[in-house]
Image (spheres, rainbow, N blue to C red):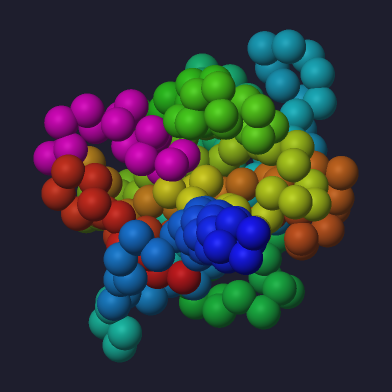
Amino acid sequence: MRRAWMIGLAAAGVALLGAAAAYAELSLDWRTQCSGLKQRGALGTTVSMSLSTQSKRLDVLGIFVVGPPGATETAFPFRLAPGQDLAHLDRNLADGVRNYFENSGFPKDLLEFTDSDWSIDDCQSLPPGLGLGRLGEWLTLRQGTACIVTWKRAASMLVSVSLADGDPWLRPFSRRLCRAITEAALAAVDPGGRDGPAYAACILIDRPARLRAPEALIEHIYSVGLYHQLAAMN
């Protein structure tokens, strides 16, 4: 009897260790390397009218600035929706980004750009489950859009904006989810893994009921190596 009890206790301990390891894998995403690059960003939400459906649409307006410490930084502005109409992208953002973020505390010198400094192309609607298939659908990952933003023809960033309905339990797993979303988006825009963007940004709207609050959005930023190897910047 005592031996059976000890075996049961050991089995329970192994199960707990396995569950803890699975939780750590999902929440900490320890397999993703860390990048030596630094990034700064500003994000906000706006509501616009969809030209294709004549309905209101949530957009994420933002700018990410990336570069090595103490060196020239590269900026990537964007305005995208999870269900973006790919035929109608906002390509004139300089004034809108500057006006939206000028009093946010974001460095004003980084907002001094023109619409000839950047471009947005190679957009894709992300697949159901946002790269996780049926598991992603079960996790309430709804829809997403990914586009490549290029700065002065020198560097580019893949920016994805995705919608989830998992509030409040989804957020601890956002690192692992964003890695899967980013990998799926990179595979869509650069199947060979050789000529893709140098950086990638995953923006997850994981608390859609709080769209007007900062906590509605979470982001994870990566540098992208050959064959889409990701290194996290934050």
Report the residue at 61% width, 47% height from top: 204
Left or right side of 146 for 224: left
How far across and how far down the image is residue 87, in percent? 51, 18
Quick one: 9 or 229, which is closer to the camera? 9
Residue that extends furthest to the top in the rendered view of this protein: 53
Instruction: Give the main secondary structure, helix, strand or loop, of the magenta stretch.
Output: helix
Check the image and report above or below for 29 versus 48. below
Q: Residue at the location (41% across, 28% down)? A: 123
User: Residue 216: x percent and y percent?
Assistant: 76, 53
Q: Is residue 79 visible?
A: yes
Residue 185: x percent and y percent?
Answer: 39, 34
Q: Is residue 169 left or right of residue 79?
A: right
Dividing the picture into quarters, in which one does residue 41 lie? bottom right
Is residue 35 shown in magenta? no
Which residue appears at 56% of the width and 29% of the height? 135
Instruction: Say above or below: 55 vs 40.
Output: above
Residue 187 inside the magenta-drawn segment: yes
Does residue 119 appear anywhere in the picture? no
User: Which range of residues does the magenta coloring cover?
Assistant: 180-195
Asked whether 98 or 143 is in front, the reply is 143
Along the line of sight, which residue is nearer the eye, 198 or 176?
176
Furthest residue toward front: 1
- The answer to which quarter of the image holds residue 113 is bottom left
Q: Residue at x 67, y 70 (%)?
A: 102
Residue 127 point in image, percent of width and height: 49, 21
What is the quadrant of the N terminus in the image?
bottom right
